[in-house]
Amino acid sequence: MDPASIIAAFILGTIGIGYFIYGKKQASASALFAGILLNLLPLMISNLVALYALGLFLMVMPIAVHKYL
């Protein structure tokens, strides 16, 4: 594993844990699932551009769901 992949996994995993904890405490299913997926995403995707793009989408998705639904 190259250093860029390790850093990306650390960043997305840290944000994912935050989303998971927030979703669990606030009973927000979208934040909870986004946190789980942010933690699992680096294990499934090796392309850094795709990893960051999907990570950004998963970070914005709970905010959009909460604001517009």
Image (cartoon, helix red, strand yellow):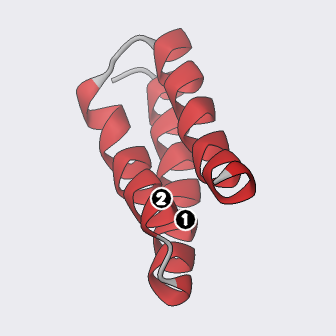
Q: Disc 1 marks which amino acid?
A: Tyr
Residue that extends furthest to the front in the rendered view of this protein? 69
Residue topped by disc 2:
30
Q: Which-is-in-front pick, marks 2 and 1?
A: 2
Q: Residues within 10 Å of mark 1 (few under 14, many from 20)?
A: many
Q: Nearer the viewer, residue 6 or 42?
A: 42
At a point 56% along the width and 84% down the height, the residue shown is 26
* Horizontal and vertical percent position of residue 60: 67, 42
Q: Which corner quadrant of the image does residue 22 belong to?
A: bottom right
Quarter of the image with the C terminus in it: bottom right
Q: Disc 2 marks which amino acid?
A: Ser
**Structural distance between the alpha carbons of marks 2 and 1:** 9 Å
At a point 49% along the width and 57% down the height, the residue shown is 16
Residue that extends furthest to the right in the rendered view of this protein? 67
At a point 53% along the width and 40% down the height, the residue shown is 58
* Horizontal and vertical percent position of residue 37: 36, 47
> In terms of sequence position, does the residue under pointer 2 or pointer 1 come before the other?
1
User: Residue 19 has which mark?
Assistant: 1
Left or right position of 43 against 38: left
